[in-house]
């Protein structure tokens, strides 16, 4: 096992979710992520906590959406309800060998299952808000993710380790420094009422008054490097073009353009995948409202990988998510969907309460 995998596990267990003795921790991943799953399992045990492991196999999602009936798609197991009400921590590890396996499944089935799963998401969101539950998402360098990123598996491994700060002598100290730098941005944005984003095919205004900005410093995603909030639900007006491809459930949508009126997406088009885009936005009533607006700040992630975990952190970008908002920000929008769309702001501007604060991918303070 690469020694950086053990560093990674300690970082996730100690820094990201802060496992304590007696905690119940769910470790979720695919068989391809077994080295990191095993390392996390060992670290959780060493801390006197109780690990639960759930491994998925290659092709499981495709088989499910191919064969499941409507009754099965909307079924929520009592085991899942009890798990959601019981676990103190969740470590989710992405490691797909085929990221395109859901491209040709019935997208209505995907939307139906997502809508049903909202019940579990609501339980976890409520418990997180109370401080009873913590989670972190990371991506193991699998062959499928490497292919999407157009790298060899070895190159992608190095990319992931660098993005997660695992080449540092002390990764925990590395992320503490990131947290300190980003906190200055959060402190400023928490005093802002309105933001306006201007760029290529983009002029959109939204209110963040009364909402809390969150410093993403490695305690939910790994790698990390962003600040985000949930905009006031009915405040979004204007239009925006997202020049990075948007990938959801393995389906790639290119050239997304959204038009907002009083918070709602009233028009959604795309150069590729427009039908899928609109089906996902019709998941439920909340899916056509913004649940998140964020700035990507990780200058160490310099290339697009088609994996939102990395891409939404790219320095000099913003992203906005359609669907569920984050209760800890004050967001009230509920949905079974949460889909991030990324925009390059290297030639863009952001105004806060009418004042220019961000230009060409950098804050001006």
Image (spheres, rainbow, N blue to C red):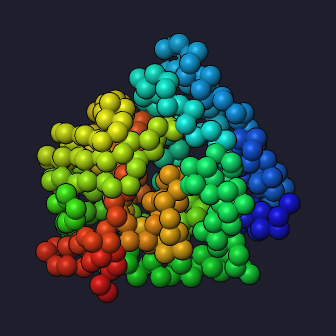
**Where residue 82 sits in the image (x, y, percent)?**
63, 33
**Where residue 325 sits in the image (x, y, percent)?**
37, 49
125 in relation to 294, above or below: above
How many dots with numbers? 0
Q: Residue 223's quadrant in the figure? A: bottom right
- Quadrant housing the C terminus: bottom left
Q: Nearer the viewer, residue 16 or 50?
A: 16
Q: Nearer the viewer, residue 73 or 121?
A: 73
Q: Residue 226's quadrant in the figure? A: bottom left
* Residue occupying image coordinates x 31% and y 68%: 345
- Quadrant housing the N terminus: bottom right
**In the figure, is residue 278 to the left or right of 37?**
left
**Where residue 324 sits in the image (x, y, percent)?**
38, 44
95 in relation to 6, above or below: above
Residue 248 is at least partly visible in this image: yes
**Where residue 176 sits in the image (x, y, percent)?**
59, 79
**In the figure, is residue 269 to the left or right of 73?**
left
**In the figure, is residue 296 to the left or right of 85?**
left
Q: Nearer the viewer, residue 229 or 25?
A: 229
* Residue occupying image coordinates x 37% and y 52%: 341
* Residue occupying image coordinates x 18% and y 52%: 239
Residue 87 is at least partly visible in this image: no
**In the figure, is residue 307 to the left or right of 201?**
right
* Residue occupying image coordinates x 42% and y 57%: 328
């Amino acid at each position: 096992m690469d020694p950086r995998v053990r560093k990674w596990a300690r970082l996730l267990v100690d820094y990201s979710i802060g496992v304590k003795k007696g905690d119940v921790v769910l470790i979720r991943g695919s068989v391809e992520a077994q080295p990191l799953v095993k390392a996390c399992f060992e670290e959780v045990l060493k801390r006197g906590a109780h690990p639960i492991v759930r491994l998925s196999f290659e092709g499981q999602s495709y088989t499910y959406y191919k064969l499941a009936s409507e009754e099965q798609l909307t079924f929520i197991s009592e085991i899942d309800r009890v798990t959601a009400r019981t676990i103190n921590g969740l470590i989710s590890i992405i490691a797909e060998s085929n990221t395109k396996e859901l491209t040709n499944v019935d997208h209505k089935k995907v939307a139906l299952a997502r809508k049903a799963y909202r019940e579990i998401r609501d339980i976890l969101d409520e418990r997180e808000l109370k401080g009873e539950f913590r989670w972190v998402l990371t991506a193991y360098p699998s062959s499928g993710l490497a292919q999407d990123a157009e790298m060899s598996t070895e190159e992608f491994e190095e990319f992931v380790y660098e993005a997660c700060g695992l080449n540092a002598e002390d990764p925990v100290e590395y992320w503490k420094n990131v947290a300190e730098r980003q906190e200055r941005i959060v402190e400023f944005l928490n005093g802002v009422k309105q933001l306006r984003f201007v760029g290529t095919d983009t002029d959109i205004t939204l209110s963040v008054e009364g909402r809390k900005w969150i410093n993403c410093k490695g305690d939910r995603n790994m790698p990390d490097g962003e600040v985000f909030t949930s905009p006031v639900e009915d405040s979004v007006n204007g239009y925006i073009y997202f020049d990075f491809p948007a990938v959801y459930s393995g389906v790639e949508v290119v050239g997304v353009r959204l038009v907002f009126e009083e918070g709602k997406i009233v028009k959604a088009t795309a150069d590729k995948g427009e039908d899928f885009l609109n089906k996902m936005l019709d998941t439920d009533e909340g899916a056509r409202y913004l649940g998140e607006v964020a700035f990507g700040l990780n200058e160490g992630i310099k290339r697009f990988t088609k994996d939102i975990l990395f891409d939404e952190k790219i320095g000099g970008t913003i992203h906005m998510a359609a669907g569920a908002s984050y209760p800890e920000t004050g967001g009230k929008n509920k949905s079974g969907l949460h889909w991030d769309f990324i925009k390059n702001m290297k030639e863009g501007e952001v105004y806060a309460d009418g004042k220019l604060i961000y230009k060409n991918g950098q804050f001006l303070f």
